[in-house]
Amino acid sequence: MTLTRINLASGRTIGLAELRMSSTYGGLLEGYPFKRMNDLKLSSLATRAASAFPARPVYLVPATREHPDETAGAFGPVELLPAVTCIGSFTSAALSPEHDAVLYYSALTVVWLQAAPAIPTGDDAEQALQSIPWDETAEDFET
């Protein structure tokens, strides 16, 4: 059973089976977010997603980065990522037309960042999430 369905720009519908949300900067006790810190955070998210959902491919949706103050501090200018980090397990119909639609499905673990803790749904999902290149990144699995 899926939590929600998202309509991709490609016309494919994907179902969200599991969703994990966390604060993007949870645990940041000192300092401020800057480019290098965010780069490390994003690369570690892909590793964390692969550990959470092993054997499934992982796709990291490109995150928006805001620069509210161009004044450089000790580590460069402030750079903010969206407040909520999401790791979702998605499924859809099989990619290969040769696979039996009853016995096969496609799956992908998706990592994205969003402004608020809300479950994306239907056509209301953010454009970056709707633009997932499913056919190029997901894999088929047998039930």
Image (cartoon, rainbow, N blue to C red):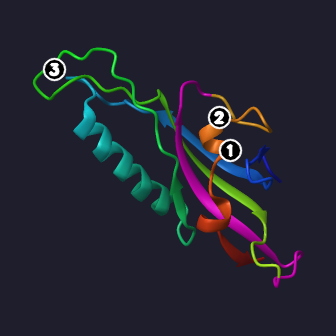
Question: Relative to 96, is 71 on the left or the right?
Answer: left
Question: With respect to residue 123, does 132 lie above or below?
Answer: below
Q: Residue 130's mark? A: 1
What amino acid type should be assigned to the residue bearing mark 2?
Glu
What amino acid type should be assigned to the residue bearing mark 1?
Gln
Nearest to N terminus: mark 1 or mark 3: 3
Q: Could you tell me residue 45's position as x and y percent?
A: 41, 50
Label 2: state its secondary structure: loop
Q: Quadrant of residue 86?
A: top right
Question: What residue do we see at 26% from left, 22% from top?
Answer: 78
| Range drawn in magenta | 98-117
**Residue behind mark 2:** 126
What amino acid type should be assigned to the residue bearing mark 3?
Ala
Question: Relative to 72, is 123 on the left or the right?
Answer: right
For marks 2 and 3, give the CA distance: 31 Å
Which quadrant holds the N terminus?
bottom right
